[in-house]
Image: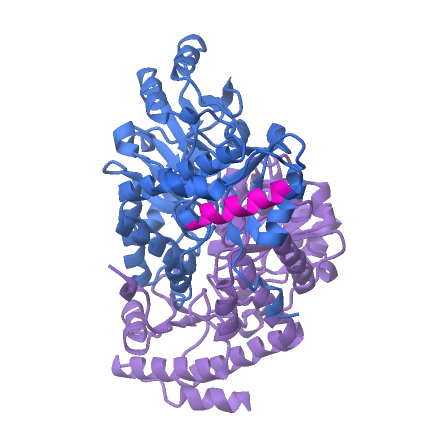
Chain colours: A blue, B purple
Amino acid sequence: MSDQQLPSIERVLLGPGPSLIAPRVMRAMTAPVLSHLDPDLVTLLDDVRARLTRVFKAPEGTLTIAMSGTGTSGMEAMVANLVGDGTRVLVVVGGYFGERLAEMCRRYGATVSRLDVEWGRAVDPAAVQAALRDGGQVDIVACVHAETSTGVLNPVKEIAALAHEHGALVIVDTVTSLGGHPVDVAGWGLDAVYSCTQKCVGAPSGMAPVAFTPAAQKRRVACRSFYLDLALLEDFWVRRKYHHTLSSTMIYALREALMAVEEEGLEERWARHERNHLALARGLAAIGLDLLPPPADRLWTLNAVRVPAGIDEAAARQRLLREFNIEVGAGLGPLAGKIWRVGLMGASSTPAMVVLFLGALEHVLRTMGHKGGSGAAAAALEALN
Amino acid sequence: MSDQQLPSIERVLLGPGPSLIAPRVMRAMTAPVLSHLDPDLVTLLDDVRARLTRVFKAPEGTLTIAMSGTGTSGMEAMVANLVGDGTRVLVVVGGYFGERLAEMCRRYGATVSRLDVEWGRAVDPAAVQAALRDGGQVDIVACVHAETSTGVLNPVKEIAALAHEHGALVIVDTVTSLGGHPVDVAGWGLDAVYSCTQKCVGAPSGMAPVAFTPAAQKRRVACRSFYLDLALLEDFWVRRKYHHTLSSTMIYALREALMAVEEEGLEERWARHERNHLALARGLAAIGLDLLPPPADRLWTLNAVRVPAGIDEAAARQRLLREFNIEVGAGLGPLAGKIWRVGLMGASSTPAMVVLFLGALEHVLRTMGHKGGSGAAAAALEALN
């Protein structure tokens, strides 16, 4: 067996992540390996910390590092360092990743109360306020900013303000927003925030940026995990004390991706994600397709497209993959079979990708018997001009 | 800021890991990204599982996968899935990584008993037998096969047999042995084994191969960690159920490295590591240097070289780095300042690396006033012929 089993052409990555990687990021990964304690790597780690602080807009004193694991390790790191036996956590659950947050808090010993929200709708801050007022004191409110399973953006700024009024910290999941939607840890008063590298940031998966603010640091618990213990990780990232063999390869990729983010500019990058999302929505409407969330609740980064009546979700998805080399995601949990998840994130958020996807989808649906109109790509391009 | 801060020449990696990476592995990493659920990636995951099973020599029914994290995540995965509140664990502690095993077991709620061994000596199986006989029943014996902090190889086959006589499982750390020393999970009856990718296996760091045998599976506990829960990871690797966004990039590298291991052949690869280690030891002796462990206890992969009297350990190490671009490791804990840790692992285990290192070291020591003889490289080459 040999190289021939590696992919020979670039998959068009329009699922819930990973997204397409810019060539400069791929090239950076092939730089010679440095050890985790090499003085030249330490310089790069300092640079990555500074860049993450700016991209998160984190306040002074925040520990901004990247966990050596995927976004899920970032989620678990926040929970493991803030949740112990008996910690009271209110979790906003409006999708698969809200469920995951609740499950992780439970595993770490929390008393979990849930605020369940209909999948596909943003949480109403008034509901959070009611839960905080009527549900008894909690120590932490945990919430997903950009719910990858439903395509919904939650009002985490408002939630953070309510949590603080009640003396609680907020843990916020920005896996599908950082680099694609405004995230402002300092301005919004978020306390413990995690993300991933492979969506809007633009690197391969394998690291999880986190921002652990001074407010969170003051309320840390004895961390049961050794691998995810932020005190030990701070000893490594800041004070160069060995903890684990961090991968220089992944650091090169993450740093190059963060450089590209800052060169583009955060505001322009957010605007690009918004433009391409709106164009996609317009194109979908032209062929009679709708998104799951109402317009005000929609992510720009991940589009939950309702599967039209009479169309076999999995069959259409397979055809996109086999005929057009396009990957989109399936629905999770109660949304299985009901939506496609179309990501326009990082290097995948371009007019070209919108046109390619809409052209392919229109063809596939028409040949499967869907009668919803035509001209999706043209409608999208019109929206872009 | 730009590319210029990435290393422009290959660091000569002769520390405790990472080791040098073969060009074919670097190339594999740059193949187009596939998502964690892409059917083409799934084929590669099956291939990686089969290769890991052969390299570990794992028995049928073993879960052989790679954690999405470094070797330390592999250690924690074994502990998190086998150790809960009150689990009784006997930990053999003869170095830094034995200490880490004990610490992790403690964090996961174990009642830990320690069998302390002098740093730099292998554990005597008779001492394990005595501890098992006199120390009360234990559920697990945890031991490091190749102790990276001291350069010592422990008799894990004998320890596993003793543990099983007493009804205990064994957790074994093969971070610095897998691919460089014989490891035989089935033949030796090891139960839960973890390793890393960046030492003798030959890939960048970032994944942790593990072998979780049927015997271990029967005694798993409710895993507190979500990220490291082997039941969920088996659902992903075997049954394709989403758990985390595994990095295809890291899988390409690991698979290519495992292909190279199998093409060379395990027995020939072990013999290569032995030959180069013996040559290094001969060369060191020619200039009056000794290794910390006695000959029978020595690793082939990691050489703990005693710093001669009158030499400043850190200054010599800095000169190797600055004048020759060679990285070696410092001593950890009680061995700080007393040893250099010289790794000859994977692509770093070659006669050329032995000669380069010895020539550089001899020069550095002579110019620092060490009078211990000369001709280190020649002596090493003689040993190789």
Relative to B10, B262 lies left or right: right
Please state the horizontal and vertical placement of residue B311, each as a whole percent of the image: 29, 73
Please state the horizontal and vertical placement of residue B343, each as a whole percent of the image: 46, 70
**Residue most extreme to the right:** B60
**Residue most extreme to the top:** A134
Looking at the image, residue A6 lies above or below residue B80: below
Q: In the image, what residue occupies the spot 65% across and 45% down?
A: B240
Write down the quadrant of residue B287 in the picture. bottom left
Relative to A249, B266 lies left or right: right
Which residues lie in the magenta part? A352-366
Between B83 and A238, the residue placed more toward the observer is: A238
How many marks on residues?
Answer: 0
Predominant SS of the magenta segment: helix
Between B117 and B20, the residue placed more toward the observer is: B20
Would residue A14 be visible to someone looking at this image? Answer: no
Please state the horizontal and vertical placement of residue B323, each as a whole percent of the image: 28, 77
Relative to B314, B58 lies left or right: right
Relative to B95, A234 lies left or right: left
Quadrant into which the N terminus of chain B falls: bottom left
Please state the horizontal and vertical placement of residue A30, each as a whole percent of the image: 42, 66
Between B233 and A122, the residue placed more toward the observer is: A122
Looking at the image, residue A258 lies above or below residue A223: below
Between A290 and B182, the residue placed more toward the observer is: A290
Would residue A54 be visible to someone looking at this image? Answer: yes
| Magenta-span inclusion, residue A354 | yes
| Magenta-span inclusion, residue A252 | no
Quadrant into which the C terminus of chain B falls: bottom right
Q: In the image, what residue occupies the spot 40% across and 36% down?
A: A278
